Amino acid sequence: MTTEEFVASLTVDKVRSVYSGKVGECCCGCAGLHTYSSAHVAEAAKARGYPVNENEVSDTVVLRILRKLQREYAHVPPSSRFLRPTFVSVDVGRRHYIAYFTDAATRTFVGQLPAEALGGNAEVDAWRAWGKENLSDWNGVEDIDAELGRGEST
């Protein structure tokens, strides 16, 4: 599966929150807006460390930004798009869009992401360490090694 196919296959139930902001600025919210899925408010609040307000929740906005990401991902230069086990992002014009995955989706995706989404061996090793540290049922190591042609796995 290519990164474009993977991004195209994403569904809104896998997205905890989205962000729309200015390219080249930080993503804390000072130059853009975080919006949260109503189905994942508790998880989002835990991840960010404080409650999500009602006015920050909009399933319509979450779906719209996910669709924008899916539509644009294959059409922007590689330097303007990123796919990692916890998020997908794309820069379109002067806007930066991000979809942050749910914890459950991340556990699933780590084993399914195409090798090019992981950036090479050093990054695979970093994700391996992250997965072991943060995901108790993470089992994607062998798949990632196989895609990279590496014989080792842990």
Image (tube, rainbow, N blue to C red):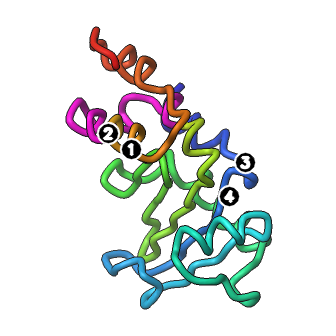
* Residue 46 image offset from top left, x and y in percent: 58, 70
Label 1 or label 4, whichever lies nearer to me, is: 1
Q: Which residue is mark 4?
A: 67
Q: Does 58 sit left or right of 26 as displayed?
A: right
Amino acid type for the residue under numbered disc 2? Ala
Which residue is drawn at the image coordinates 72% and 73% (left, top)?
61
Circle 4 — which element? helix
Residues in magenta, as a range: 110-126
The amino acid on which the numbered mark 1 sits, given as a three-letter code, is Glu
Amino acid at the residue labelled 4 = Arg
Crowding around mark 3 (Cα neighbors within 10 Å: few <14, some 14 to 19, many 20+) is few
Q: Position of residue 108 (x, y in %)?
A: 59, 36
From the viewer's perspective, is the residue at label 1 or at label 3 nearer?
A: 1
Secondary structure at numbered mark 2: helix
Q: Which residue is mark 3?
A: 11
* 35 to 131, vertically: above or below: below
Under circle 1, the secondary element is: helix
**Label 4 to label 2, Cα distance in Å?**
31 Å
Question: Which label lies toward us, 4 or 3?
Answer: 3
Q: Which residue is mark 2?
A: 129
- Residue at the spot of label 1: 133
Residue 125: within the magenta?
yes
Residue 85 vs 141, above or below: the answer is below
Which residue is painted at 49% across and 36% down in the image?
110
